[in-house]
Image (cartoon, coloured by chain):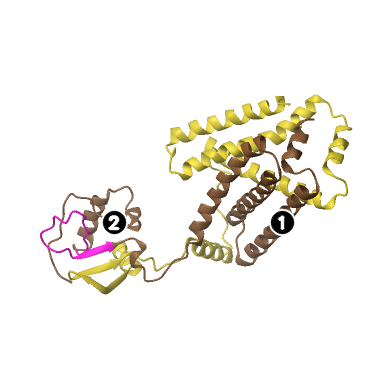
Amino acid sequence: MEENQPCQKSSKAQLAPAWSTELDQKSPTESLFYRSSLLSRTLVAQQKDQDCPYPLTATIHGSSSLYAASVSKAASLHWTGERVVSVLLLAMGPAAYYFPGPAVDYSLAAALTLHGHWGIGQVLTDYVHGEPKIKMVNAGLFLLSTVTFAGLCYFNYNDVGICKAVALLWSK
Amino acid sequence: MALLLRTFTRQGTCLFRPQFGILCRHAVPMGTTANEEMNTFWAKNNKLNRPMSPHLTIYKWSMPMMMSITHRGTGVGLSGGISAFALLALVLPGNYPYYLDLIHSLSVGPALLSLAKFGIAFPVSYHTLNGIRHLFWDSGKGFKIPEVYRSGYVVIVLSILTSIAAIGYM
C-alpha cells in the first residue's frame, strides 16, 4: 500500500451508508476526518472531481458493483410488489363505482386477496417467532388466502358479483 | 478501537482490482440478512428464557402509535371479514339476495342500521386513507413530526366524514 498524503479537501466524500450510521449525526466529511485520525490516515474516500494532484491510498465502494457474493433481491421486490398492489387496489375503488362488472369483480377479488395475504403475512412476521411456528402459520395463511380467492371467484361466477353485492348491501 | 476492529472484520479487502496502485476495500457485508439476525435474536433469548422488558405497558401512547395499530387492526379485521364472506359463499346453500332479504326481514331499525353501515364504512375508509398516508411515507415525504401529526389528523377527520357521508348515501 502506498503511503501518501491523503487529500483532505472540502469536497464531498463518497462514503458507504454503513459508515455514516456508526457515527451518529456526523456529516460525511466530518466522519472522514474522525476516521482518518483513528485509522492513521490509511483510508481516504474517492473524490469525484479529481482535483487531487497525487493518487489516493484507498477507495471505498459501497455499491453492489464489485460484490464478491450476490444478495437475493427477493425482499426488496416483495416490498415493491406490495406497494404496486396497494396502488392498484386504490384505483379499483372508483373503477368499481363507475364501471361495475365482471372485469372489476375478478380484479377486485385478486387484488383484495393478495393485499390481504401480504398484509397478514407482515403481521405474522412481526409477532410469530421460531422457525417451526413461522412455517406453520405461513402455511395456514396460504391455505386461508387460497380459500378466500376461490370463494370470491365462486361468488363472482355463481352469484351477483362483488360490485353488485356492495351496491345491494348499501341499498338497505 | 473497537470501531477499528469492527471495520476490518466486517469488510473484505480485495486486491484483484489495482487501479492506479490503490488498495480497494469493499463495503461487502460479510454478515447476515436482517431476517437471519432477527431469528438469531429470538432463538437466543427464548433459549435463555429471558423475560421481555415492558414496552407497551410503560411507554406513553402517542397519536401516531394509536393510528398505526388502528391501521393494523382495521386491516386484519377487514381481511378476516373478506375471508369469512368468501368462506360463507362457498359453504352456504342459498344465494346472496336470499340472505340479504333474510337480514332485511329482521327489521333492525334505522339507528342500528346506520350503526352497522358505519361499522363497515369506517374501517374501510380509515384503512384506505391511512394507506394513502403510508404510500406518501414510502415515497419519502412527510416524515417531519409536525407533518406526521397533521396528516394523521387529516386522515381521522376525513375517515369520519366519509363514513358518515356513506351512511347518508342511497
Q: In which quarter of the image is the N terminus of chain B?
A: bottom left
Question: What is the chain identity of the residue bearing mark 2?
Answer: A
Question: What is the chain identity of the residue bearing mark 1?
Answer: A
Q: Give the residue displayed 85% in from the left and 45% down from the top.
A: B95
> Looking at the image, is A37 positioned above or below residue B56?
below
- Segment colored magenta: A42-60
Q: Nearer the viewer, residue A170 or B110?
A: A170
> Pointer 2: what residue?
A15
Q: Give the residue displayed 74% in from the left and 32% down from the top.
A: B117
Circle nearer the N terminus (1, 2): 2
- Marks 1/2 same chain: yes
Q: How far apart are marks 1 and 2 (CA)?
A: 46 Å
Helix, strand, or loop for circle 1?
Answer: helix
Q: In this view, does B103 lie to the left or right of A3?
A: right
Residue B56, how many percent across, how many down?
57, 45
Q: Is residue B154 left or right of residue B14?
A: right
What mark, if any, has residue A144 been given in the picture? 1
> Looking at the image, is A119 positioned above or below residue B142?
below
* Numbered disc in front, either 1 or 2: 1
Q: The brown chain is which one?
A: A
Q: Nearer the viewer, residue A118 or B96?
A: B96
Q: What residue type is labelled 2?
A: Leu
> Looking at the image, is B127 positioned above or below residue A40?
above
Residue A172, how many percent across, how many down?
80, 30
Residue B54, how many percent across, how many down?
56, 49
Q: What residue type is labelled 1?
A: Leu
For the residues labelled 1 and 2, say whether their Cβ atoms are less than 8 Å apart: no
Residue B113, how many percent across, how many down?
79, 29
Q: In the rendered picture, chain B carries what hue?
A: yellow
Q: Give the residue displayed 61% in from the left and 50% down from the top.
A: A119
Q: Nearer the viewer, residue B100 or A154?
A: A154
Helix, strand, or loop for circle 2?
Answer: loop
